[in-house]
Image (spheres, grey):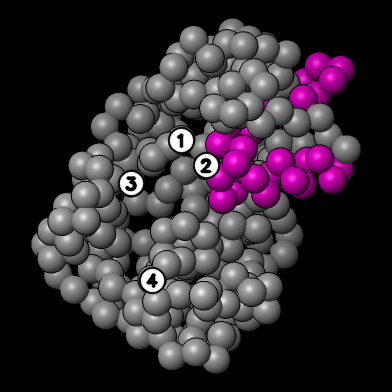
Amino acid sequence: MGDANGTTLVIGGTGKTGRRVVERLAARGEPVRVGSRAGTPPFDWEDRATWAPALHGMSRVYVTYQPDLAVPGAAETVGELARLAARSDVRRLVLLSGRGEEGAQRAEEAVKQAGVEWTVLRASWFAQNFSENFLLDAVLAGEVVLPADGVREPFVDADDIADAAVAALTEDGHTGRIYELTGPRALTFAEAVDEIARATGRPLRYVPIPAEAFIAGMRADGVPEDVVWLMNELFTQVLDGRNEAVADGVQRALGRPPRDFGDYARATASAGAWDAHG
């Protein structure tokens, strides 16, 4: 595995999957460097001068791109980083990608051509979007409003993604593979919200709205335009049914089935993530 110290750079090391990858590597006694603006040295996607110092001495890199691989220019940026990683003697790169996104697939191709051992984790919608950041406030308020009506998504647990990432980073046998990571069943957003309601024992409602109304509401709330663009892309393009199929990536990568959304909801509720505040 790479050089003697075998250190892993986790880009996005404070995010949903990155934080979990850092925790798992550290628990195994693996040297790990958190790639973030607050890291030592810092890493910032928007400041290319930070890339080389962060990559220096690294054997393996886990790459998550912010805000999303769907945004214009993301593939080129990730490709540039991957080529720099190769020149920096990084041996192995694991990319967190998305299902059904053309930009993500271009980023995957850029990584494949960079000259390092690579693995792609092509993940579906995170279950943790309901409990960490994005939809947490809506769940706490008792009403989740989104422009998704009837489309099914095989929500994947971020812990499964992290386990697959650690396996690909530290074990042999994953190089050159694309793992499509999903949960074991596809749910509508309304069904997912119902599962959370049952797990919490609190009333929780799902309200589908037209995409135009959702986007107008975001703009009215002062959401930055780049985030508005991304949400519009996600809900009008990616969440159109193309990703409804359940995939076997977790089983292939880890030799076990993926975690079910109901299990995620019950464990998250037990941990107090959805307890009402104030």
Evaluate if marks 3 and 4 touch, with contact meaning CB atoms under 8 Å apart. no
Evaluate if marks 3 and 1 touch, with contact meaning CB atoms under 8 Å apart. no
Mark 3 or mark 4: name the one nearer the start of the chain: 3
Mark nearer the viewer, 3 or 1: 1
Crowd tier of the residue under label 1, counting other residues whose Cα lies within 10 Å: few below 14, some 14–19, many 20 or above: many
Mark nearer the viewer, 1 or 2: 1
The CA distance from mark 1 to mark 2 is 8 Å
Residue on which disc 2 sits: 96
**Figure check: 92 above or below 161:** above
Q: What residue is drawn where x is 54% and y is 56%?
A: 181
Q: What residue is drawn where x is 72% and y is 64%?
A: 256
Q: Residue 138 carries which label?
A: 4
Q: What residue is drawn where x is 81% and y is 40%?
A: 26
The CA distance from mark 3 to mark 4 is 26 Å
Mark nearer the viewer, 3 or 4: 4
Crowd tier of the residue under label 3, counting other residues whose Cα lies within 10 Å: few below 14, some 14–19, many 20 or above: many
The CA distance from mark 3 to mark 1 is 14 Å
- Amino acid type of disc 4? Ala
Task: Tell me, yes or no, whether the highlighted magenta stretch contains residue 109.
Answer: no
- Amino acid type of disc 3? Glu
Element type where label 1 sits in the image = loop
